[in-house]
Image (cartoon, grey):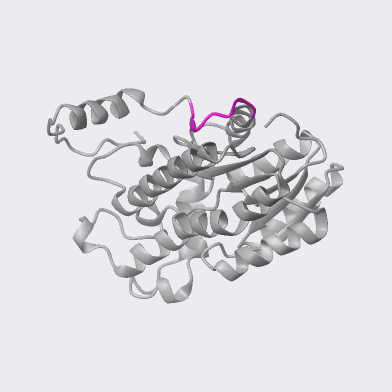
Amino acid sequence: MQGFKGKVAVVTGGANGIGRSLGKRFAEEGMKVVLADIEEEALAKTVDEFTRQGFEVAGVRTDVADPAAIEALANQTVERFGGVHILCNNAGVAGDLDFLSKRGERIWEHSMKDWKWTFDINFWGVVHGIRTFTPIMLSQGQEGHIVNTASMAGLLSGPTADIYGATKHAVVRITEALYHQLKLDHSPVSASVLCPGIIKTRIYSSGRNRPGALFEGDHPSGTDLRQQAAEADTYWAKDGLSPDEVAGQVLQSIRDDQLYILTRDVPLERISERTENIVNGRNPRVTQPRPIRP
């Protein structure tokens, strides 16, 4: 996809972090942008900021776990701007990595609430986006691109990030299938999977948006969740790449029709080692979890 000016982009998880930066970068290219997010206040603030910068932008509160909400998002986008040319299925939660979730459990110890919440957003949110928007984009007969946000956790293995990593491996795989199918159909629409490393976002405190029904029983009574969220944001904001850098890389990857988008901090040697283990029928080295912060 080469032409961006006047086209329409939809970004889920668009109020903060990578989604916000993607929306801004698309708008700077002259695109009309629809930002979708479950956090209504943050969404309104971002839309207001972008509007004051002269961007043509709309905000739609959206729960990506709800297929009806994704359909409503698509309908509102088409009604307002006439079509969709770029879709970023970007909304995501940290799940078992979350500071507001239990830490250190074995995979058999996680509650079903942890599994459901993380898969509802990270996996089903992407599926709902693909199922709803792809037919619309194909019907337009124009260049288009779908970017699904996974993670470096979708390319690695090990003892940590079991639920989160499972969702991200799934996103990588369905995006690969989507890419191949679109190419086999000679479609002007293509696809990419974004696998970032550690980025300065608020994903590690994403439990602030966890529905109450999926929260009960996972936390000690009296826990100050808001305070924990603030502490998590402060902790993870110390390091990591800028979301703006990621957005610039995504834009170039759309131009280049690049399937795999890996940020520069992703440990390629660990991906290579995993692949070599599979190809050679070799068991992985079992080591203690590597801290991703000192």
Whether residue 219 is visible to the viewer of this picture, yes or no, is no
Q: Nearer the viewer, residue 273 or 233?
A: 273
> In the image, is residue 195 part of the stretch drawn in magenta?
no
Q: Position of residue 192 (x, y in %)?
A: 53, 37
Q: Nearer the viewer, residue 80 or 271?
A: 80
Residue 190 relative to residue 41: left or right: left
Figure check: 79 above or below 172:
below
Q: Nearer the viewer, residue 208 or 62?
A: 62
Identify which residue is drawn at 14% across, 36% down: 286
Snapshot quadrant of residue 266 = top left
Q: Quadrant of the N terminus?
A: top right
Q: Position of residue 29 (x, y in %)?
A: 77, 33
Q: Quadrant of the C terminus?
A: top left
Figure check: 130 above or below 143:
below
Q: How many numbered marks, from 0 up?
A: 0
Identify which residue is drawn at 62% across, 62% down: 39
Residue 216 relative to residue 272: left or right: right
Whether residue 10 is visible to the viewer of this picture, yes or no, is yes
Snapshot quadrant of residue 191 = top right
Figure check: 66 above or below 270:
below
Identify which residue is drawn at 40% across, 68% down: 223
What's drawn in magenta, residue-wise? 255-263
Q: Residue furthest front?
A: 185
Identify which residue is drawn at 23% across, 57% down: 105
> In the image, is residue 259 part of the stretch drawn in magenta?
yes
Q: Position of residue 18 (x, y in %)?
A: 59, 42
Q: Position of residue 62 (x, y in %)?
A: 63, 64
Residue 114 relative to residue 284: left or right: right
